[in-house]
Amino acid sequence: MLTVLHAADFHLDSPFRALAPQAAQRRRAAQREAVERLAELAQTCRADLALLAGDLWEDAAQLYPETLEALPRALGRFPCPVVIAPGNHDPYGPDSPYARPIWPENVHIFRSPAVTPLPFPSLGVTVYGCAFTSPFREDDPLAGFTAPQDGGLALGVFHGDVAGAGRYAPIAPESLAHSGLAYAALGHIHAPRLCPDLPTPWAYPGCTQGRGFDELGERGCCLVTLDERGLQDITFRPLPGPRYYERTLDLTGRDPAQAVADALSDLKKDDALRLTLTGETEELNLPALQRLGSGHPGALELRDETARPQDPWARLEEDTLTGHFLREMARRLEEATPAQRPRLEEALRCGLAALEGREEPR
Ligand SMILES: [Mn+2]
């Protein structure tokens, strides 16, 4: 049995421009720590091989020296070979950090845009992969490629866009199907997507850490097990670290400050929450509500979509259909028994909504 750890899209040293400088700095530190957590996971699950499918950093020109120390050090802690297929954010080139003598012996980096074999005879595995050598690549790196069926296990690691048609190495489904690979470890798409189907199982592990409200929830890597017949299992494994969440909070009948405090209570310090406030409530004191998030620096985003409570009887005197409706409902409610009232009140709300052309009763 072969255990493969597959990760991609670390985007180390992302700018986190939406955050205050200190919070952004903590996010970058957490990104570096995520690579340490990956190394620990590789140790605890006794990985035989790690496949990193590109975009390990956001921009080589903006890398901090700390990162160029931390990344090779963390990769050196993997108990196995680590194979990197550079992507559009970390393309290989003579000036790339990948060309510097900073990488430990267990790290192997693809340098050519052509698919190249990298054999690991002791594992009975050949890894096929290639590199972005510039920020764009419009051809399909797997077009016309088929791994020789030489008895060993053929695995692939590529940065590219499955079924995409853009400038980031579009990989056609037919190319994958004809590749002869027992598993294709992909990178580029930031949401996890696992496709274990034959003939060529593939997956995107997604980015190792969310960087904004377009990258919500748990983030991590894939653990893949294979035997000589091929894929046995793919599992998504979340990594610890700051998370982005998006929630809706209905404030109808609630104390806004208490409701927002409750929503924040299960959030970790560096987590970020976008909270859309809905329902009927008095005018909100947004700065005061925002201050409740001061324990989560720069990471509570409030969106006020609340409505003011309406007096249903405001138009009772009007000589309009609505006025007639309200007067009729007032008469019936006056005569109603307590048991009849809830149904009539519901009819009042629905009737008013219909007259106002609303989709939902207030
Ligand atoms: Mn990426």
Image (cartoon, rainbow, N blue to C red):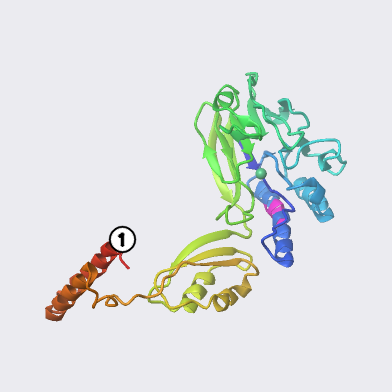
Q: Is residue 131 left or right of residue 359?
A: right
Is 214 inside the magenta-drawn segment?
A: no
Q: Secondary structure at mark 1?
A: loop
Residue 222 picture quarter: top right
- The residue furthest right is 101
Reading the image, the residue beneath label 1 is 357
The residue closer to the viewer here, 297 or 347, is 347
- The residue furthest front is 319
- The residue furthest bottom is 334
Measuring 61% from the left and 32% from the top, which residue is drawn there?
Answer: 184
Q: Looking at the rendering, in which quadrant would you find the C terminus?
A: bottom left
Does residue 148 sit above or below 40 in this rendering? Answer: above
Q: Is residue 62 left or right of residue 145?
A: right
Residue 359 picture quarter: bottom left
Q: Which residues lie in the magenta part? A: 33-37
- Asked if residue 339 shows in the view, the reply is no
Percent of width and height locating residue 25:
74, 62
Q: Looking at the rendering, in which quadrant would you find the N terminus?
A: top right
Percent of width and height locating residue 270:
64, 65
In the image, what residue type sits under mark 1? Gly
Majority secondary structure in the magenta region: helix
Measuring 19% from the left and 70% from the top, which residue is drawn there?
Answer: 325
The residue closer to the viewer here, 356 or 109, is 356
Percent of width and height locating residue 95:
86, 39
Q: Is residue 197 left or right of residue 82?
A: left
Query: 10 Å neighbourhood of mark 1: few (<14), some, or many (≥20)?
Result: few
The residue closer to the viewer here, 46 or 269, is 269
- Asked if residue 251 shows in the view, the reply is yes
Does residue 345 sit above or below 235 in this rendering? Answer: below
